[in-house]
Image (tube, grey):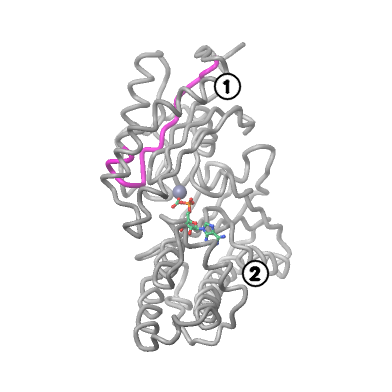
Amino acid sequence: MSADLILGVETSCDDTSLALVAEDGTVTACETVNQYSIHEAFGGVFPDLASRAHLAAILPTLQQVMGAIDHDRARIAAIAVTRGPGLIGSLLVGVNAAQGLGLAWGKPVIGVNHLRGHLRSPELEGGQIVYPALVLLVSGGHTALALMESATRITALGQTRDDSMGECYDKVARSLGLPMPGGPAIDRLAADGTPRHPLPRPMLREGYAFSFSGLKSSIARLLEREPALMQTEAARADVAASFVAACLDIAEAKLDRALAAHPVASVVVVGGVAASRPLRDRIGALAARHGVTLSLPPLTWATDNAAMIALAGWDYLRAGQAPGLRADPALALDAW
Ligand code: KG4
Ligand code: ZN
């Protein structure tokens, strides 16, 4: 058989993921090891422990995915590895491993922008983005709005100035005494609540940039001022519902503005927070009002995974332009 697969390697944050993906997006294998149990006690990802956990997990995970093709290296066209953005120590584990494998196996190694992986994720396993598309990326590490004219013509419209939406979900969940990951726990609690607390919607009227730190701290202040809110499930549910309402208003306002300015065929929501049912419903209604289709990746491909990195790797391979392998913790959304 010919070299029909890219081996994807993703270690930018707290998931060690490896995958084998064909050029049409078919996923032959994808194995992801998460680190929730390691970071739970810190209430967030502890960078040093994350790199060590990647080191421990990467070779066994490689063995597992290569097992899916009987360790037949002839089928590997290239190795695609996330080179940024992310935690520098975590990125270096993946980049060094990929470089070593490339040398040992005689395969090209491609440094991939993690955010491009997220943007391409809906096209894994037969999914399709209808171009041109407006993409809202909402994950634990990132919140951004981008215009995609094609798989590779990407223009960043705006990004968060501070926290990401997912990070804000996780911090608010912690303030409310909920476990990691915070997103699903907040959504469950919010479903029974009423959004009765007035909370800020930072930068609602200002272009396409986002800011979430003010929202996060106003919830911390609210809980400090009114400790009784923590004492019943119903009161906590109202806080969660008020928080979710603020996030939805922000996401909707930014997309609404972008849709009015850019004639597109579809709206795409990617990243871990795209799993949120209320967000899906709200953006679905917005897309319908604008007469455009809505694409969402299934949850497996919404959260961090190496399959999306391998799929983006094919774009780089076809373009014949390698951006190099320098790990860059702050790599921009529209950087190649
Ligand atoms: O994309 P992802 O796995 O990681 C990064 O690239 O950062 O996103 C993880 C984030 C976490 O903050 C998690 O709380 C959030 O996605 N999340 C959700 C839901 N499921 C995961 N947020 C809201 N509702 C959900 N159902
Ligand atoms: Zn990510």
Height in image: 218 above or below 103? Answer: below
The amino acid type, in three-letter code, at marker 2 is Arg
Q: Which residue is mark 1?
A: 68
Q: Residue furthest front?
A: 231
> Ligand 1 closer than 8 Å to the CB at disc 1?
no
> Ligand 1 closer than 8 Å to the CB at disc 2?
no
* Residue 200 - label: none
Image location of residue 258, percent across then percent down: 56, 66
Question: In the rendered view of the protein, which quadrant contains the C terminus?
Answer: top left
Q: Kindly indicate the quadrant of the structure image that contains residue 268.
A: bottom right
Residue shown at 59% from the left, 79% from the top: 193
Q: Kindly indicate the quadrant of the structure image that contains residue 143.
A: bottom left
* Residue 282 - label: 2
Q: Is 194 on the left-hand or right-hand side of 332?
A: right
Image location of residue 197, percent across then percent down: 50, 86
Q: Is 288 on the left-hand or right-hand side of 148?
A: right
- Label 1, secondary structure: give it: loop
First in sequence: mark 1 or mark 2? 1
Q: Kindly indicate the quadrant of the structure image that contains residue 228.
A: bottom left
Magenta run includes residue 305: no
- Label 2, secondary structure: give it: helix
The residue segment tinted magenta is 75-91
